[in-house]
Structures are given as structure tokens and as C-alpha cells.
Image (cartoon, grey):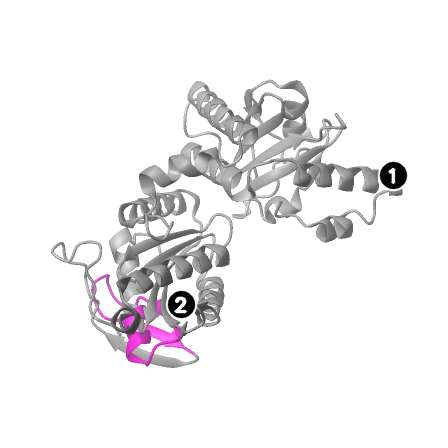
Amino acid sequence: MSTSRHQLESRLKRRGTRARRRLLEAIDDVADSDMPPVGEVGLIVRDLARRVHAETALLAVQDQDSENVGVVLAAWGDLSGSDGLPFLSPADGFVGRVLSSGHAAVEPLDPDQDRSLGIAVSGARLTWTAGAAVTPPGRPPGALCVGFSDGPTLDPPTILWLVESYARLAALCLHEAGMLDGLVASAHVDGLTGCLDYAAIRSELDREIGRCTRHRRALSCCFIDLDGFKRVNDRHGHPSGNSVLAEIAAVLREGVRIGDSVGRYGGDEFVAILPDTDQAGAYMLAERLRSMISATTLIDDRVRLDASVGVALWRPGTTTDELLAEADQALLQAKRAGGGIVLTASRTTRAGWPLSSTRDGCRATGPIRPRFASEGPAGTVPRN
């Protein structure tokens, strides 16, 4: 569970002793059960929200010992994430009603009276909602719900069919933890690193740009390149180099947040997609990832690597290729500055023209290096 017991104790200080004990016990019951990892059900919640163009989404399950308590396993698009909605009751608006009744519905929502779907990150008022029951055999029932600000863009029957379909997928995951991992890995994951592959990370960025265009949200992208990786292959051999890539990929996946995506773009280059993140937030996260990489010992404690990171903020009208080019340009400037730093890119002219990269007041300019078809996904300019 992403919500810690300590956080819940802080949130429940104002409740009565009995209520606080009962709710904390409910959280412990779910955390101790054989539930899927938050990232797995979080992926379902996030993908459903994107599919139906919703502002928020969540998955809640009923406590096994009490019909009056529901625990939020995963939330997406809410201002405070699943930490902000740790528990529900049948009286808690639309989500509570779906949880207790087991009925699917699409209906208007009064945001002043019903906060069960949280507060949208964008600040938009939720005026419509849809939800369906999640019914894994031998497990507590749940509810998968989404919230809309301007009403559904799809017709209600289609919305309902999609929500019910994702609810069945969530039920499979609740019934058998880890079943989704194999499905995802077989189609879209790089076999060496476990990250999204070249095609999948570009497709993910396409989808995020479309979502940001519709909902006017922030989006940032990071290009991450390992400093001195060529020397690892030269000194220790390519099998050791592959092991290093796999370990670094694990570090990156651990360092990002639920809802972020990490992909291997080619060679020792990785891309991180950071939804709902402005440039300052992306810089802080990129620096954290760089620090985690530099602190990791590799190949039996014989090797340490640092990384250079380029960060770019999406702006309306920017395409996937243009956003990647901006991040790539910032990365090139970081490499030219000696590596081991994070640089942010700011567009000063049209896409394809020189950009400026800044860090701590320093500025440097240079031409954008495009990706040529002849390079392929692994084609890179030597940077070591």
C-alpha cells in the first residue's frame, strides 16, 4: 500500500478512538492480504482514466471484516493521490454507493456534496461520474470509478462498457496478484531492462500529449544517459554491461512515482515521462534519479556511474518528436558540460531551431540533433 500507517494515524487524529482503531485495522487487513502491488492496480486505474478522458479515477475495496469501511487501493488524477482518500463508507457519495450496491452507473455529480472521487489535480470541478463493481471470487468486492469535469466525451453506454471491462480486469488482478505483469511484459517491455521499449515509450508520450491537450495539464520529459558506460563494456565485457543496464533500469523504476513511465530509448539512454509535472518539479525528480544512479554500486561494487539528464516541459502544440528533441538537446548540453548534471531546456524559437538549456543560471546553446530513421531506436551520437 502506498498509504503508510503513520500517515493514516495523522489523518485520523480528529476521529474518535474506536473509529480510528477500526479504520487502521481495515488498512492493515488489506495490506496483509495477498493483494496485487499498488503499481499493478494503479496501472489499470490510470489507463482507464486516459481511455475515457476522465479527470480522476480510483479503485476501492471493501474491508473483509466490516461492510462499513472501504479502502482505496489506487487513485489517479486526485490532488493528493490515494493518500487523500484512504478509506470510504457506503455513505461516501457515488464511490461508496457502488461499493455497497455492486451496481454500475453513469450519472451527474454534485461536487459540492460528493467528494468521494477526490479533487482533480487540474482544479476542475467534477460534474459527472461513472463506476462499476469489482467482484473477484473469494475476495472482498470493490468499486472502480472515474470522474469527469465537462461530462463524458464518449456516449454513456460506451463509458459504462469500458468501466465494466476494466473492472473485470481489476478483479483478475485482485484474484491473482501479478497476473498483469506477464501480459504487459510480453507486448511492450524491453527484455533486458524491464522498462517500456522504444515503441511503447513513444506511444505513451503520444497519449500523454493528447491528454494534456484536452485537459490543459502539465507534462515533462527527461532524457537520461549514463556517463562513461562505454568504458564498462570495454573493461568488463558486454555481459557485465547488460547487467549494469538492468540494475540502472531498476533504480529508475524505483525512483519515479506511480503514474510516471520509464522506457529504454536505445543503448544506455532512457526516457522518463512525468505527467502533471512542471519544469521545476521535473528538475527535482531528475536530480533525484541522477543521485540514485550515482549512489548505486555495480558489478560487485567495482563500478559506479553517474548520469546526465535533459529535462523538457511540454507546451501546447509541441509534438512527441519536438518534445524529445528538446530533452535530447538539454542532455547533449549536459554531456558537453562534463556530465553528471541535470539541465532543463526552454524553447526560444520554433521547434527545430536552437534551444537554451539552463542550470543554476548558466546558459548554453547548440543545434538540435534529430533522430534519423537510419539510426533506428538504438542510434545515438557517442557521448562518453
The stretch of residues the image draws in magenta is: 330-359
The disc placed on residue 276 is none
In the displayed image of the protein, which residue is found farthest to the left? 374
Q: Would residue 201 appear left or right of 258 to someone viewing this image? A: left
Which of pointers 1 and 2 lies earlier in the amino acid sequence? 1
Q: Residue at x 56, y 42 (%)?
A: 38
Q: Would residue 270 appear left or right of 7 to someone viewing this image? A: left
Specify whether residue 350 is painted magenta.
Answer: yes
Specify whether residue 149 is painted magenta.
Answer: no
Where does label 1 land, which residue? 18
Q: Is residue 112 visible?
A: no
Q: Is residue 321 visible?
A: yes
> Residue 59, image x and y in percent?
58, 34
Q: For the residue marked with disc 2, what is the amino acid? A: Ile
Q: Quadrant of the N terminus?
A: top right
> Residue 74, image x and y in percent?
57, 40
The disc placed on residue 299 is 2
> Residue 17, image x and y in percent?
88, 43
Disc 2: CA contacts within 10 A as few (<14), some (14-19) or many (>=20): some
Q: Is residue 361 above or below residue 318?
A: below
Q: Quadrant of the C terminus?
A: bottom left
Q: Residue at x 50, y 24 (%)?
A: 168
Q: For the residue marked with disc 1, what is the amino acid? A: Arg
